[in-house]
Image: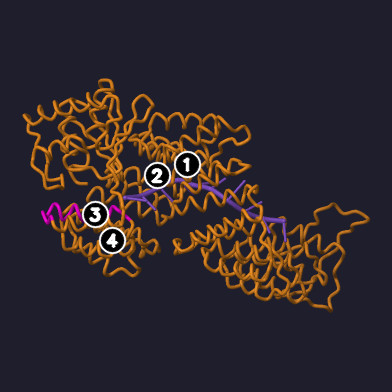
Amino acid sequence: MWAFHTPQPTQPPSLFNPPRAPPKLPSSSLAVNPSISTSTPNNNQLIQSLCKRGNLKQALKLLSHEPNPSQRTYELLILSCAHQNSLSLAQSLHSHISENGFDQDPFLVTKLITMYSELDSLDDARKVFDKTRKRTIFVWNALFRALTLAGLGEEVLGLYGKMNRIGLPSDRFTYTYVLKACVASECMVSLLKKGKEIHAHILRHGFEAHVHVMTTLVDMYARFGFVAQAGIVFKNMPVRNVVSWSAMIACYAKNEKPFEALELFREMMIETHDSVPNSVTMVSVLQACAALSALEQGKLIHAYVLRRGLDSVLPVISALITMYSRCGELELGQRIFDRMEKRDVVSWNSLISSYGIHGYGKKAMQIFQEMIHQGVSPSPITFVSVLGACSHAGLVEEGKRLFDSMRKVHGIIPSVEHYACMVDLLGRANRLEEAARIIYEMRIEPGAKVWGSLLGSCRIHCNVELAERASHRLFQLEPLSAGNYVLLADIYAEAEMWDDVKRVRKLLETRSLQKVAGRSWIEVKRKMYSFVSVDEFNPQIEEIQSLLIKLSAEMKEKGYRPQTKVVLYDLDEGEKERILLGHSEKLAVAFGLINTNKGETIRITKNLRLCEDCHSFTKFISKFTNKEILVRDVNRFHHFQNGVCSCEDYW
DNA sequence: TAAATTGCTC
């Protein structure tokens, strides 16, 4: 029941505008009572000002005595209902609108659809649309927006086809919504074609100068991973603003093109005067630094963030924490976290995953507990982070308990990502059967991520039979992903099943897929150097190679044994050793030894999992040369010091 | 009447 208080008029009483006592009749519904005629010319204004002050209940109370509510009054009431998050009030207001014959007013229909969308009641939104006889472009767009926000992309595209068939032309808003609809759906692959069609429409109808439309187009290609296509659209844009630049930088950062992201940022700073980077831009730029482990670059960006006063923006701070920890500076990340005045779940997630990738599983769990203790509700990503941390540290039982608590204690239903974490946790610990059982007992469809986790574990523990089962599914799910074929071939090779190796490699060839080359990066004096297995481009390559040969010989005397079994070709031992010395990580280590000062840590990043020989080699080097070496592989950090690694040989 | 970019996973 709505309480009744005397509303305060917004204007002081005057002779022309006398305050009136509101009706004192009790009323429990919003229905208009025509017998009451207490309305004044001011009632509409009064209701509106109540809405503006957030006093919705009183406004509705007053509405029940107003025989002639205006369109503006209804508009403010609708906005107020959405704002107060009350579906029941919204629905009674809706009935009131219908009873007063405003339910065909296209303006109010648009507002109603948006209101229901914000209240997560899409059924109501659809009903409003269905009942509307005169559907203006605003009405269509409102429904498109509602459905897109709810992730119902296919439905939008179906309706969009209908709109085209009745001959109603799209406007710039329609285009942004339908482009977003192409990526806001479960089966994105089929919708890329649709997206390209819409792209053609946009050009045909002369919308290429509309910044919003073109920026959304860039973003759509970015989300499909079509980086080159996104780049073409961006280049051809006649008008760009901060958002367009940010979208393109984000595209590079999110699609494993961090160099390009930083380069475009540089271009943005130099070439544009009206597009000043904002907090959103900086988040992507920091991601790019994190991806490259470019600590010096990252520090410069941090300085810029401070200069621009963006250092109190939560997403920027979280990105800074992640950047520092991914550059190996876990303590700096922790310090930034400590200094935060306000923290959200993402800040906590950043810190948890930071400890996770550095191998501090127990610490990550402690931080998780502390977060719960402080009353912050964990998000699904919190669990991915903390389960990942358990996995890296081999905390199997702890991880299982956390996974159980997800649903039972925190009411979060595990998604494929969480199952993938569990499979990884168990698989890495050589509990492969248990990992497989998890997959068979899953309540949702195990996607490529889950099977991929299992295949990865089979690679570590060389389990041919399970690997065959996992890869069978993977080849169906993602036939074009070269990594899966390579893993299976590696497993066969380790089991010396050379015929099968040949068969899988042949498969890779016939599908014209390329194996991802091993690559390592190192930052020396603010410049990034990248190494692939055979690198003739580095001017110091000869010096690097002879250093490696010398070190290898000397270390063999101290007990280093080249792990030639990681070379998965049927070759003689000498040849295998030669190949091992050409691994990109060793090249980067040698380059670091040559080009860093005494006492300076060597920091390397690698795009794949560290191979066992590089791991053992780097351990020896750290003792032999008395150097600290920090290597980030695709999963985690390895901190080599005095002959031991922080991962304790579990990775 | 409305809109485009972002943080935390592997």
Depicted A651 relative to depicted A28: above or below: above
Q: Amino acid at mark 3?
A: Gly
Q: Residue at x 13, y 30 (%)?
A: A552
Task: Give me the C-alpha separation between circle 4 and circle 1.
Answer: 30 Å
**Circle 4 residue:** A451
Of mark 4 and mark 1, the one earlier in the sequence is 1
Measured in 3D between alpha carbons, the distance from the residue under mark 4 to the one under mark 3, in whole angstroms, is: 9 Å
The residue under label 2 is: A256
**Of the residues under marks 2 and 3, which one precedes in the sequence?**
2
Would residue A369 be seen by someone viewing this image from the given angle?
A: no
Crowd around label 1: few <14 · some 14–19 · many ≥20 (10 Å): many
Residue A489 on the magenta span: yes
Disc nearest the viewer among 2 and 1: 2
Q: Residue extending furthest front?
A: A510
Camera-near label (2 vs 4) is: 2
> In terms of sequence position, does the residue under pointer 2 or pointer 4 come before the other?
2
Residues marked 4 and 3 touching at CB (< 8 Å) = no
Marks 4/1 in contact by CB < 8 Å: the verdict is no
Q: Which mark is residue A284?
A: 1
Q: Which chain is rendered orange in the image?
A: A
Mark 4 vs mark 3: which is more N-terminal? 4
Classify mark 2: helix, strand or loop. loop
Give, as a single range, the part of the protein colored magenta.
A481-498
Q: Which amino acid type corresponds to the residue marked 4 in the rendered image?
A: Trp
Q: Chain of mark 2?
A: A
Residues beneath discs 4 and 3 located on the same chain? yes
**Residue identified by numbered label 3:** A456
What amino acid is at disc 2? Glu
Q: Which mark is residue A631?
A: none
Crowding at label 3, few (<14), some or many (≥20) Cα neighbours within 10 Å? Answer: many
Element on which disc 4 rests = helix
Chain letter of the residue beneath label 4 in the structure image:
A
